[in-house]
Image (cartoon, rainbow, N blue to C red):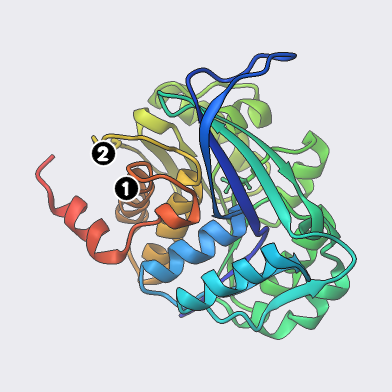
Amino acid sequence: MSIAVVGSSNIDFAARVAKLPLPGQTVLAKEYKSGPGGKGCNQALAVARLGASPVFISKIGDDLLGNQLVSTLTNEGIDTSHLIITDAAQTGTALISIDTIGENMITVVGGANMTMTRGDLHEKQDCLRDCDYLLLQLECPVVAVDCAIKYAREGRAKIILDPAPVPDHMVIRDLLTLTNIVTPNSSECLAMTGIEPIDMATATDAANKLHEMGPETVIIKMGSKGAFYSSDGQTGLVSSFAVSAIDTVGAGDCFNAGLAVALDSGQSIADAVRFACATGALSTTRNGAADAAPNREQVLELLAEPA
Ligand code: RIB
């Protein structure tokens, strides 16, 4: 069984602020921390910490930040041979502000991520055809995402698409016809369906709209309200885990990593969503994005705690 991740790699620069700035406002922060980020890198690193060996396809610049990402991934035991290195653009960066209640604002400078082409994916077609699950997000060009999906579907892969950041409606509609499992958060779900998922009834309505667009499985990440799933006629709302959250950046990425690892090991959809919720929850208890991903033992420990 194998998991491939195609997506962005960034270095995140995160400042802690008392209050998020309003348009036109300057706010002061005491310090910033930098570390590995990007939705693709966060997912790949979390998959590795959960005990699987992801094939990670991502594009970085031939620069210091790119070298930093290669070292991080290598230290985590991730095969870096599928990284594409370009001298035509800088490694992606994300400028993040996080306030005292953990709310954040993120500006992504896509850089090398946005230069990923069909040709880049053509070079990787064999490993895409070989995977069982393909994790994708939308911080790389849609043509590249679409191409990765097409190669993976020539094999046996199930496609797990995180529609983040949520793009233009028409673009997402085309991708959804090729997606098996779609995993929006509440605001992405609202943007895609016009329905704000706030409980089982509204989540069910939104999921039905998403099913009509293609995916047979819909999972809606509803933060503290838990995660809703709808798959093959089964629906459920998995409660969130009570943790002391300090930084939610990358929590959705850890959720998707947990989901893929659990499904890849044969868990049912309900158990896999619970495993994903625990993975995402633990990541919020630490600072950083990829760095905050928990390992398998930590997730199993949280799952074993009495509710
Ligand atoms: O999902 C969180 C990620 O979004 C951050 O790591 C940042 O790099 C942006 O891509």
Q: Is residue 303 left or right of residue 184?
A: left
Residue 64 rendering spot, x and y as whole percentages = 70, 66
- Label 2 element class: loop
Q: Amino acid at mark 2?
A: Phe
Residue 49 rendering spot, x and y as whole percentages = 38, 68
Q: Residue at 12% x, 48% y: name it.
A: 305
- N-term-proximal mark, 1 vs 2: 2
- Label 1 element class: helix
Q: Is residue 296 above or below residue 31?
A: below
Q: Is residue 122 above or below residue 241?
A: below
Q: Residue at 80% x, 36% y: name it.
A: 168
CA distance for labels 1 and 2: 9 Å
| Relative depth, front residue between 266 and 32 | 32
Do labels 1 and 2 touch, CB within 8 Å? yes
- Dividing the image into 4 quarters, which one contains the C terminus? top left
Q: Residue at 65% x, 84% y: name it.
A: 81
Q: Is mark 2 within 8 Å of ligand 1?
A: no
Q: Amino acid at mark 1?
A: Leu
Q: Which mark is residue 291?
A: none
| Dot 1 alpha-carbon crowd within 10 angstroms: few under 14, some 14 to 19, many 20 or more | many
Residue 132 in view? no
Q: Is residue 40 left or right of residue 245?
A: right
| Dot 2 alpha-carbon crowd within 10 angstroms: few under 14, some 14 to 19, many 20 or more | many
Q: Is residue 91 left or right of residue 68?
A: right
| Relative depth, front residue between 64 and 202 | 64
Residue 16 rendering spot, x and y as whole percentages = 49, 31
Residue 157 rendering spot, x and y as whole percentages = 59, 72
Q: Which residue is mark 1?
A: 282
Q: Which residue is mark 2?
A: 241
Could you say which quadrant of the image residue 46 lies in?
bottom left
Q: Is residue 283 above or below residue 69?
A: above
